[in-house]
Image (spheres, rainbow, N blue to C red):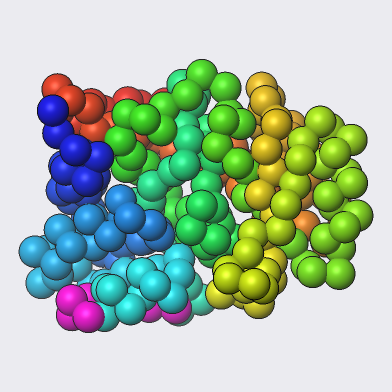
Amino acid sequence: MLTQDELKTQVGQAALHYVVPGDIVGVGTGSTVNKFIDALASMKGQIKGAVSSSVASTERLLALGIPVFDANAVGEISVYIDGADEIDGRGYMIKGGGAALTREKIVAAQSRRFVCIADESKLVTVLGKFPLPVEVIPMATQRLIRQFAALGGTAQVRMKGAAPLVTDNGQHILDVTGLQIKEPLAFESEVNQWPGVVTVGVFAHQRAQVCLLGTAGGVKTLTY
């Protein structure tokens, strides 16, 4: 049996097939994406560079000699490669375990195609098993906790040591448990309207068109 780390390596390498030579590639954040970044180094002479969704990914790309462009300096991106905390049978995802959900959603919206790379443990029937990350403006935290409670969810501020984690955007993260998100499009639209929400970690409007799923039998390609 392959380990989870080996499955991540497999899908990271498989994602190279979707990188368009001569283009700029959108790069997400997280442990699975780190495997993709490492694999992308073998193609760095064939691409112009990358647009990154986090400081951590930017640092890793630069360390490997891959140029990183500001999103505002480029137009449409051909493909965005990123992981997911959960993905369902329609390509809808929960993302944000690495606290980069806002920038991830921005780069995804700028890209023609979203390719999700994940191991088979991330495939679910209904979103909500993984805590839902929500990036919030700190002054709205307690009111948003109450709003999620009204939906049956329990929200907690994500901590880093003794203090709230601060995102690359200078905001905080709520992690919400106890939800079953059966209508991701409607849920994402609703929560995005709540004052104080920067980004909700449901990726339905920016869903994946392809998922490369690492399984014991190899990489399985799911299309939506």
Q: Point out residue 132 in the picture as x, y percentages from the top left corner.
A: 63, 43
Reply above or below: 223 against 98: above
Is residue 106 visible in this depiction of the protein? no
Numbered-mark total: 0
Q: Point out residue 31 in the picture as x, y percentages from the top left corner.
A: 33, 55
Q: Can you tell which quarter of the image residue 169 is in?
A: bottom right
Q: Residue at x 76, y 40 (%)?
A: 154
From the viewer's side, name the closer residue of 112 and 88. 88
Residue extent of the magenta highlight: 63-70
From the viewer's side, name the closer residue of 1 and 85. 1
The furthest residue to the front: 162
Q: Residue at x 69, y 43 (%)?
A: 176
Reply above or below: 44 against 21: below
Q: Point out residue 33 in the picture as x, y percentages from the top left corner.
A: 31, 55
**Magenta span contains residue 19:** no
Q: Can you tell which quarter of the image residue 94 is in?
A: top right
**Magenta span contains residue 67:** yes
Q: Residue at x 57, y 22 (%)?
A: 126
Is residue 108 visible in this depiction of the protein? yes
With 9 as the anchor, is 113 left or right in this view? Answer: right
From the viewer's side, name the closer residue of 50 and 144. 144
